[in-house]
Image (cartoon, rainbow, N blue to C red):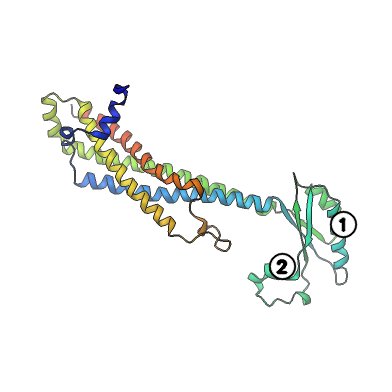
Amino acid sequence: MRARLAPLFALIGGDAQADRVVPPTGFTANLTVFSSGAMAFLAVFALALSLATGRLAEQWGDALAQSSTIRVSAPEGQMDQQVIAVMDVLRTTPGVADARVLTDEEQRALLEPWFGPDLPLDTLPIPRLIEVIEEGDGYDPEGLRQRLAGEAPGAVLDDHTRWRDPLVRAANRLRMLGAISIVLIAATTGTIITLAANAALAANAQVIHVLRLVGARDSYIAGAFVRRFTLRALIGAFAGMLAGVIAILLLPSADVGGGFLTGLGFQGWHWALPFAIPLLAALVAFAATRRAANTTLRELS
């Protein structure tokens, strides 16, 4: 068991003699810490974007999937008769839980963003709107449209499909883009750390040669680079992650009027996810440095 955990103990505890092979400061050290921190900062926002769009897709789906609207247009004097006919049809339609006619105040509130607060509804030929709430698996839209065409020719059913589907598809694509962004950030971090490790190895070629002369194995030398660069990436990513979380906390809180942008953040147990980013950065740095060290040491042989 101890033999299996030896690489982990070596990574955490290190070796003072082996660590001298790796420059503690300089260009490669600063590049590793800065790139890990910057990528972790971006990863926090990519993760927040992915989770926020997922919540948004669920909200849009829940809000629109179980509701629909019927727009009733009729000549003057026939509006009430048409509305009564529509309500009679809805009361006998399977899958309809409730239906109600929107009041003048509610319709005015819907039109206010486009026409202002002083819209004279009583003098304009504005259709009446009926809100329909579904239950269970919902109703048959085509069947309801045929019944409305026979009983109330001026009624038009909008089951929100043309609104709901594009919105949900857009939210799902944004969530996918957030996940792709995290993968690209991890790949970029690995590439930068690989370049930094190669530069450090090349700069210490003479030291590596001397170590080989006194009997040091390549695994011993590579371990020093792997440990130093992994810890640098972990420290930089942790700092970048904290900065990203603080930036998320400073965003306006979510509210009904704010919409998507004010909802960009974490909720519940999702706040624990950003703390996995430094660990992911350390794993990427470990794999990238190990591969770079082994490749470069073979070339220096």
Q: Secondary structure at mark 1?
A: helix
Q: Residue at x 56, y 47 (%)?
A: 172
Number of marks = 2
Towards the viewer: 5 or 161: 5
212 horizontally vs 161: left or right = left
How far apart are the two marked residues, 1 and 2, measured between alpha carbons? 22 Å
**What kind of residue is marked 1?**
Asp
**What kind of residue is marked 2?**
Glu
**Residue that mark 1 sits on:** 88
x%, y% of residue 94?
82, 47
The mark that comes first in sequence, 1 or 2, is 1
Residue 145 is marked as none
Q: Residue at x 28, y 40 (%)?
A: 231
Q: Does residue 157 lie above or below 94 as drawn?
A: below
Query: Label 1 crowding class (10 Å Cα cut-off): few <14, some 14-19, many 20+?
Result: few
Q: Does residue 261 lie above or below 197 as drawn?
A: below
59 horizontally vs 66: left or right = left
x%, y% of residue 18?
17, 32
x%, y% of residue 119?
70, 76
Asked whether residue 297 appears in the rendered view, the answer is yes
Asked whether residue 296 appears in the rendered view, the answer is no
x%, y% of residue 122?
78, 76
Query: Label 2 crowding class (10 Å Cα cut-off): few <14, some 14-19, many 20+?
Result: few
Residue 106 is marked as 2
